[in-house]
Image (tube, rainbow, N blue to C red):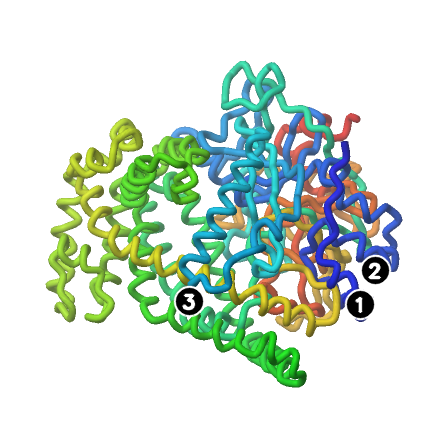
Amino acid sequence: MKTRLPMILPVLALLAAERPVAGDEGMWMPQQIPDLAAKLRERGFEGDPAAFSDLTGQPMGAIVFLGGCTASFVSPEGLIATNHHCATGALQYNSTPRRNLLVDGFVAKSRDGEESNGPGARVYVTVSVKDVTEAMTGRIDTKLDDRRRFDVVDRRTKEKVAACEASGHRCAVTPFFGGLKYFEIAQLEIQDVRLVYAPPVGIGNFGGETDNWRWPRHTGDWSFFRAYVGSDGRLAAFSKDNVPYRPAHWLRVQPAGVKEGDLVFVVGYPGRTQRHQTYAEVKETTEWMFPRIVRTYQEQIAILEALGKTDEELQIKAASRLRNLNNYLTNRKGMLEGLLEGGVLGRKKESQEALAAWIAADPERQKEYADVLPALDALQAESERTRERDAALTSLFTASPLLDQAHTAHLLAVEKAKKNDLDREAEYQQRNWVRIRESFERAQRTVDPRIDRALLKWAVGYAAALPAEQRIGGLDRLVGLTPGMAEPDADKAIEQYLERLVSGTKMADREFRLSLLDKTAAEVAATKDPFVDLALALDPLHQQNREAQKRKAGGMARLRPRYMKALLASAGGLVAPDANATLRVTFGTVKGKAQAADGTAWTAFTTLKGIEQKHTGEGEFDAPDRQLEAIRELRGGKTTPYADPAIGDVPVDFLSTVDITGGNSGSPTLNGRGEFVGLAFDGTYDTIASDFLFDDVNTRSIHADVRYMLWVMTEVDGAAHIVHEMLDR
């Protein structure tokens, strides 16, 4: 049975007739696509726009979520295509110093050779989206304070999720437009995911951080997984007896690729954008959050790189974390430049001033909205008051997986003691207990006290420098720190404490860590493990901050919908909600750039010739010998169906005007007929700040070209059997 999505916000549908959508902006909800039919027809689309609102049809039924990246079924045997960088965790999980898949890549020659992605790996297929706004926001007593309002919405969310999951799906209730609308989303949750193929690093990450977020790009950013289920066809955890999942829909691969000017779609799960934030929120991000992120990421990267040089095992364990840090560092640098030098922050201020003027121009609008912006600014100012302390606390937990898991074990024990699952904090409800255990098991491949010690030294150092009014008392008492303590004395105290912490812990032992998940809170504390002691010392501030976050969330639930209602009414057009890791559709054109920010012209495609020119044989530009030999054979007259006669070479990557962000990694790129022609994997550095304010002139997204994928798989990596699986239909 087809699942048609309800149409979104009738008021917006009416507004859509007043002003056409500009440019290619829009990470659209699938149910909004029919309202864009006229624009799509202008671009040459000959299909039925309503097909995008059918989640169980073609192509939407083939799109899946990996929990952080997007992917898609590309064969009837459960084969899944995604980005290479989305497979870093699976490659790391299956690597050893003697068998380093992160460097050498992986090709399973048969189904028996496909490797498990490890505990916690998931594939999610969205099967339904239901409008539950009235159930979530209706009949809330307007006299409730913000803290109690949070509890009402939180309870309703848990009840809705529990009722939905009685069907056997994984469910969520997600706010859109700042809580103006709520949708219940049900997903099929596939639990057995296996690594099938990933090219070596010299292809999958060719250019590394030097080329990251840059054009021209020559990165083969793809990999393949396979989904498995029980022999009875039901969802099941990993077992050697499982069989490949047979999806109802998969994408047809189009080996002819695309040409400049073609209409393309990207369908996926974009993570977060901030286009509807207030000026005060964006200002704090610009002036404090992003500068802090850039500084602290640089410091963490330097620590991890230095550790990796001392031991190959440490290098493998830190690989995924290091790649993520580098990726986000470049991203945040680009966003910061766009917000400041690109003038995005200034334009956000202008747009909010225009909204305030629009409200002030009409007595009825004043009555309805005049208090909203000042109240939102007050909530923001309150959250900024202790931001240095709160960020330092967060850094302690993110720096040390061992500390974070000790704290998780304590929190889980506290919540398990509650008799009613609805009374538990959402992340510690029974529906998540298996996931928590899986995360503890998976961590065994990456945890190492040497990494924790190095990064904790860095994180505790930040906390030691906090001013007197923002101290983390529990940490000070354990380490022996005082406000204004001289740096040499603080360093000595930190070193002595970390020595006691690491030498006395059992947290790196798998069995000990897992045993904590079966203990009561008192039993966890009674272990007296130094990491548990540290977690318990930090927990009072964690709880204090959680209460503050709930109060703020309750205030946002009261104010943000009214703010968004005013913003949407003043916009006078169909508007896409900010990205929130739910299924979205975006479209644009394959297109270069006549004049880029660097003063050069960008062609729409890169080719194998660029790999030849960039290859140095060292570092980030070290293409595999077998790839260079395949290129030489091509230059010597060997033919291939994957060369483009118009450009005289095999295309590698291409540019388009589609609107994407983090989370879209691995999203399939579709042509106007819904056929697979590549994978989205990046934006360009000059317009990363489009997450805050879209640049409809300069924004470009980067895609791996299907022809390069097929050529490498056939001519370089010995993966022709996977090509046949995709093309033989």
Q: Position of residue 240 (x, y in %)?
A: 51, 16
Residue toward you, 715 or 572: 572
Tell me whether circle 2 and circle 1 mark residues in contact (CB < 8 Å). yes
Residue toward you, 500 or 385: 385
The residue wearing badge 3 is 289
Compared with 687, 35 (above or below) is above
* Three-letter residue code for mark 1: Pro
Distance of label 2 from label 1 (alpha carbons): 8 Å
* Three-letter residue code for mark 2: Lys
The residue wearing badge 2 is 39
Secondary structure under tag 2 reads helix
Q: Nearer the viewer, mark 3 or mark 1?
A: 1
The residue wearing badge 1 is 20
Distance of label 2 from label 3 (alpha carbons): 38 Å
Residue at horizontal 67%, vertical 56%? 27
Residue at horizontal 68%, vertical 44%? 668
